[in-house]
Amino acid sequence: MQVYPDGMQFELDFGYHIAAIDIFLKALGMARANGYEGEFPASYIETVGKMTAVTWNLLFPDWSNPMFGDTKSHDKNSLQRQFRSWSKVFPGDKQLQWFATEGRKGALPDYTSQQFPESGFYVLRTGWDKNATVTVVKAGPPAFWHNQPDNGTFELWHRGRNFFPDSGCFSYGGTSSSNADRRKYAASTAHNTVTLDNKNVSSDGKMLKQFSKSGSGHSYQALVLENPSYEGLTHRRTIFMVDDKFYVILDEAYGSAAGTVNLNFNITEGTDAQVVYDTSEGGFHTAFADGNNLLVRTRASKSGAYVQKTGFVSYNINQTAERKAYQLNLEKTADEPVVRYATVLLPTSDASAEEVSITLGDWSETGGSVRVQVGGVSYPALSYTL
């Protein structure tokens, strides 16, 4: 009852997911120790096995984890101890064995990207090593207290740096003051998603389509996700991973609602010289001295406002740090069927040397497209049809 068919625990929280695995395996361990293992159906053990697979699938190559919901940042040593413990229960699981021994035994998965559609977690990765680029997206069903109204949000990790860490939770609440803190960190605007009038979204996300396409020397993977965020406004987010080099996010807010549509971005920590707003370009870039950087550019379907904000991020309870954040705001009227954004996220060594051009294509409730030019290379239209 607590676990979706894809193996994710129903709180949709990485930390509570791990805790549930340990609880379930302690029950099994006590039964084994007392000769009652046979009382547990095979489906029980199979379900816990799926749960362990979800865990390592969601990890970034440096063993850091997405912090969706009430999840804190977990350390590598504690994760490895859990993998070693779990591996004793599932000795034939080569992938779990690889993570338990950090590659000395077992084998890496024979795939890169993975989807968990019942719980709404999606992973687009170029590989498993530390030079990879990995994006984890969340668009799940209604959940419980340890979840947040964050459908559509994502984290993007590249070569050891998380360029969009989740805001975390900072507080579990319990008093009037800490409940206010909890609401602040849980707010939809504190996540990388689309909102209306800065209000929290409703959660009932689903994947409409997943596909790959290649041709003309280029290829991409795509996810089409949708969330009925407000009465009269649905948010559709299509994420293209192009040539394993960069991402394009196509956001479409459609329906009869009127108001200010906000595209929210909450950026990695850094000084003013390291994380730079590019107001006129509708984005930002980083300039870290280690050469691990990101260029972000957005083109909207109409003119709007670029609003700089002071963001925040909490990697553990009662700990916080400031960071930069911003919104791209568009005014939508009731008779306007849709407002759209297309965003390029380009990992690069030197963002100042990159050029990006974006052209929005057609849209309907059954499809949309966008064209991009990156580094002087024109890419075929990125499109989806439902």
Image: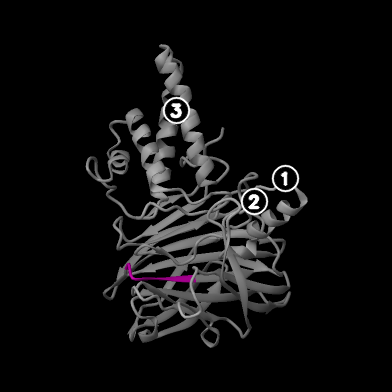
Between circles 3 and 2, the one closer to the viewer is 2
- Which structural element holds mark 2? loop
- Circle 2: is it few (<14), some (14-19), or many (20+) Cα within 10 Å? many
Q: Tell me if mark 3 has few (under 14), some (14-19) or many (20+) residues whose alpha carbon lies within 10 angstroms of its own.
A: some
In the rendered structure, which disc, 3 or 1, sits on the residue that comes first in sequence? 3
Q: Name the residue under label 2.
A: 171
How far apart marks 3 and 2 lie (CA) works out to 29 Å
Amino acid bearing label 3:
Leu
Secondary element type, mark 3: helix
Q: Residue 115: x, y in percent?
A: 43, 51
The residue wearing badge 1 is 174
Q: Name the residue under label 3.
A: 25
- Residue 380 is left or right of residue 260, and the answer is left
Q: Which residue is drawn at 34% across and 73% down?
A: 290
Q: Hey, which residue is sitting farthest right in the picture?
A: 176
Q: Is residue 246 in the magenta section? A: yes
Assign a secondary structure to mark 1.
loop
Q: Where 274 falls versus 86 (above or below)? A: below
Q: Is residue 6 above or below residue 375?
A: above
Percent position (x, y) of residue 226? 56, 60
Mark 3 vs mark 1, foreground winner is 1
Question: Residue 297, can we see it?
Answer: no
Q: What residue type is labelled 1?
A: Gly
